Image: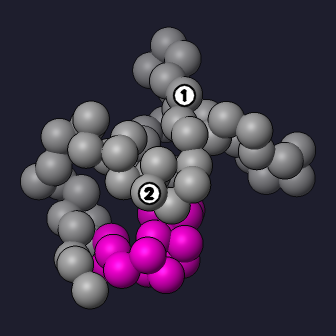
Amino acid sequence: MSEVKLSEIPKYKKFQLASVAGYKIIQINNRYKIDGADNYIDNDFRSIDDILKFISPDLKRKGFNIAA
């Protein structure tokens, strides 16, 4: 299992990490959204790190452990 420290990786790697778990992240005016997300979640995040923490169970299944 690979440990990923969010503070140490660049933003483009974070977008790639989300795509490994099957998510597409959209950045709009310094806000982030999960493309195609259902309406039952609040789909407005301040940072991509918040999204990666939100999808961390899916990332863990792919072999990535998220560390803030």
Please tell me which residue is depicted at 27% across the width and 72% down the height of the picture. Answer: 67
Q: Mark 2 points at which residue?
A: 20
**Closer to the camera in the image, 51 or 22:** 22
Q: What segment carries the magenta color?
A: 53-66
Amino acid, disc 1: Ile
Residue 19: x and y, percent? Answer: 47, 49
Looking at the image, the residue that sits furthest to the bottom is 1
How is the rendered protein coloured? Answer: one colour
- The residue closer to the viewer here, 22 or 4, is 22
Callout 2 environment at 10 Å: few (<14), some (14 to 19), or many (20+)? some
Task: Classify mark 1: helix, strand or loop.
Answer: strand
Check disc 1 and report the residue beneath it: 26
Pointers 1 and 2 in contact (C-beta within 8 Å):
no
Q: Nearer the viewer, residue 9 or 46?
A: 9
Q: Position of residue 12 (x, y in %)?
A: 27, 35
Q: Is mark 2 on a helix, strand or loop?
A: helix
Q: Earlier in the sequence, mark 1 or mark 2?
A: 2
In this view, 65 is above or below 17: below
